[in-house]
Amino acid sequence: MTLKLGVIGTGAIGQEHIRRCNNVLQGAKVVAVSDINTDGARAALQRLNIDAQVYQDGHEVINSPEVDAVLVTSWDPTHEEFTLAAIAAGKPVFCEKPLALSAEGCRRIVDAEIKHGKRLVQVGFMRPYDAGYRALKKVITDGEIGEPLMLHCAHRNQSVGENYTTDMAITNTLIHELDVLRWLTEDDYKSVQVVFPRTTSKSHAKLKDPQIVLFETQKGIRIDVEIFVNCAYGYDIQCEVVGEEGIAKLPEPSAIQTRKNARLGNALLTDWKDRFIDAYDVELQAFINDVKAGELTGPSAWDGFAASVAADACLKAQNSGGIEPVDMPSRPDFYAR
Ligand code: NAI
Ligand code: ISE
């Protein structure tokens, strides 16, 4: 049986996911899409050479009898509404990060899913599916570097647009680390502080860039994450774990090494689409397979909630300049791993 997918939001990642569902992955096809820019949606389908129904409104996609499962790839503030509507319709939903703009919004999704009685939500946290992060986790869980003591991380984008604001560095960008570092360390955050170095001249009035986010975890691990979204030189994700017996580092994406003009060089990537291209394939294939098997196993609404609890504390810390607690409630049995 081919799983029939509806996609809400046909921008950058929406088009990427439509392409991979129809051309790369097995067992699913996109049959319906919507975007507030319907002309853009039609043009995207034409470019991708895909025949699907175009709707004006995301709710029409969710409620279409033709659609078995939904992908939410529209702007961050729309995620909660569409995910809640998919749960109300009893349809599995893959929602891009963040699950909602606040922990309160994520909690409403968690409550609705628990009330439904069965998992329907997978959040688009793709890094746990990345081969590099998986290898890093294996080194830690195999005890190769002893107990982790410190993590040094960086999330650098080449540039962002004028609509990107200081809080989005947390809710839209750091949210990946908020999820993957919990998964990597099997720990929860205890407190957080955000400090602002001098802002780059490449930023604009609504964005302080870079930022450094400092966490203490429940086990006492200290984590620093640099978020620098106008770093100018490329797309660069770094993660180094310092353990009691050694250090493990996230592998660099493979690149051809050149020797030219008396210089040794390795090209760097510039776009998230390329950096995590395999991880996106694996996460969505897992969603498709899990929906068909009747049981979702990927990043859950609870993971989305946990990341947003930490994000809320980061936003508070951005404003207060002090150390803010991260108050994470205990996990309901419904989400037991
Ligand atoms: P984008 O701006 O390229 O595309 C978003 C699309 O959503 C636009 O075409 C817009 O018209 C549409 N849209 C907005 N409101 C809508 C509504 N109510 N109904 C239907 N369509 C609506 O943005 P991009 O980069 O594709 O990001 C989309 C989402 O995916 C964001 O939430 C972002 O956080 C997430 N994302 C995740 C990534 C990842 O690494 N997992 C990478 C990039 C984006
Ligand atoms: C974007 O939405 C993503 O999710 C990318 O993975 C991230 O690197 C970027 O900062 C976000 O804006």
Image (spheres, rainbow, N blue to C red):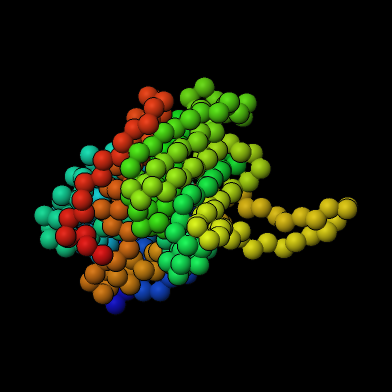
Residue lying furthest bottom in this view? 1
Residue displayed at 52% across by 54% down: 242
Residue visible at 49% across and 42% down?
A: 224
Q: How many marks?
A: 0
| Residue 187, placed above or below residue 233 | below
Residue 134 on image: x %, y %: 47, 65
Please state if 74 lies on the left or on the right of 60 as rendered: right
**In the drawing, does residue 333 fall left or right of residue 155?**
left
Residue located farthest toward the right when viewing the structure as drawn = 261
Depth check: give the residue in front, 89 or 328.
328
Near-viewer residue (236 or 22):
236
Whether residue 320 sits left or right of residue 293 in the image: it is right
The percent coordinates of residue 72 (x first, y second) are 33, 52
Residue 55 visible: no
Q: Would you place residue 259 above or below residue 192 in this image?
A: below
Q: Is residue 163 above or below residue 153?
A: above
Q: Residue at x 29, y 77 (%)?
A: 1
Q: Residue at x 70, y 55 (%)?
A: 267
State which quadrant residue 289 falls in: bottom left
Q: From the image, which quarter does the C terminus lie in?
A: bottom left
Q: Position of residue 246 (x, y in %)?
A: 55, 60
Residue 317 visible within the image: yes
Q: Give the camera-side residue of 164 and 51.
A: 164
Q: Position of residue 69 (x, y in %)?
A: 27, 62
